[in-house]
Image (cartoon, grey):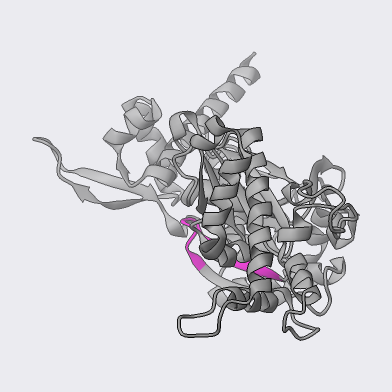
Amino acid sequence: MAERDRRTARDLRRGNRARVLRRLYFDGPLSRQELGPATGLSSGSISNVVAELAAERLLEEAGIVDSDGGRPRTLLRVAPGGALLIGIDIGETRVRVELFDLSLTELARTERLLAQHGHDVERIVAHVRTGVAHVLRDAGADPRQLLGIGVGVPGIVERDGPRGAVVHGQTLGWTAVPFEQLLRAAVDVPGEVPFFIDNGAKTLGQAEMWFGGGRGTGTAAIALIGSGIGASVIHGGEGGTLDESRRGSALEWGHTTVQLRGRRCRCGSIGCLEAYAGAEAMRERWQEAGGPLPADADDETALAALLAAAFPPPGGPAPDPVAVSLLDETAECLGAAVADLINLFLPERVLLGGWAGLQLGPHLLPGIRRHAAEYALRHAAARATVEMGRLGPDAVTVGAATLPLSDFLARGGTRPLPPVADGGPPRRWASAPT
């Protein structure tokens, strides 16, 4: 019974720490007096938790504000230098690695293009290994400060097996790739640093929900449009307040059907959204239509040329009717697929992101909105807005970094412990102080 009571006290303390850290992270700086009603904790509990977190250098003072008739109040915030995070985007054109402080301010970055060697697993693991080493070196950072490494990948991610996260990326030729196991064996970081691997569209969605266009909504659907297409549905807290503890869902949205007996998709099926609106498919369609592209043009070059042909600058040549027609069809396919998201998940917002989505959006967004309204149920469409994501091309890496950050906040600021010295299994996390 005594042991059970000790566990309960420890868990309660950790829960109190988590409440304070979450509120300060998302709503700070706040004073001790403001933290009470924001967390529901007593003033004594607030004082104890703040003292602990400050002693661990996770909180710091952020100025003083006057109080109505009382003493000035000291503001507190989560200390940016309290820890480090790494976010990695395993995209379809490049591997991007970024190092962040605890406020998600970028400290260093590096990229590796994938055009020459594609998605060979061993080469991508090598890119991650060198990328992590480079960002730590460039920032002069101590890897022992890492809370974790978050990785966004294309495809379906299975967790909790004996080999850690396993990735099924059919369009990449990845079948049950033990990606977490491969990264742990290759990346030179302390053994206690955890890896968090999830679908890239979901990490994009989490970033937009925490810091971008989805913040303040109850539910948002976020589309990642690149060479391929994915999406996620992310839920906010009650009344639209941010609750990073609620999990979202990754969707293989690009492989929903938009055309019966349509184009062959690289997944092997026919008529998929990705076969019409993914950048790789748009490059192929533009070339098939006689678009003036070099045979070896990559997806980014091809999409830029297609948009330039359809939307020339003022005083330039007339719009290319073939390019205009192709993009009109793309807008309708995306609008119909957005309508499916609206009908199925009733989001308050649909956000378009990904490198290709960011390029297409300024030109196609009015058409996508129009077609979404035509294809969706009226009531569902009336309560949803279709907008651009706000975090730009780095949203997947930011979202990947939120994976270890979310775990850290949920655990009340506890940190990884060193491996057990006798060769036993590593102790993954420190417990909150008792």
* SS assignment for the magenta stretch, majority: strand
Left or right: residue 387 compared with residue 295: left
Q: Is residue 402 visible?
A: no
Left or right: residue 295 compared with residue 1: right
- Could you say where residue 410 lies in the image, as x and y percent from the top left? 56, 38
Q: Relative to residue 425, is residue 141 depicted above or below?
A: below
Front-most of 278 and 396? Answer: 278
For the point 63% across and 77% down, the residue is 320
Q: Quadrant of the N terminus?
A: top right
For the point 48% across and 57% down, the residue is 390
User: Residue furthest toward the left?
Assistant: 69
User: Residue furthest toward the top?
Assistant: 1
- Could you say where residue 38 lies in the image, as x and y percent from the top left? 36, 31
Front-most of 242 and 146? Answer: 242
Left or right: residue 349 compared with residue 135: left
Q: Is residue 420 magenta?
A: no
Residue 32, quarter of the rendered image:
top left
Residue 246, quarter of the rendered image:
top right
- Could you say where residue 201 lies in the image, as x and y percent from the top left? 67, 52
For the point 56% across and 42% down, the residue is 373
What's drawn in magenta, residue-wise? 94-106
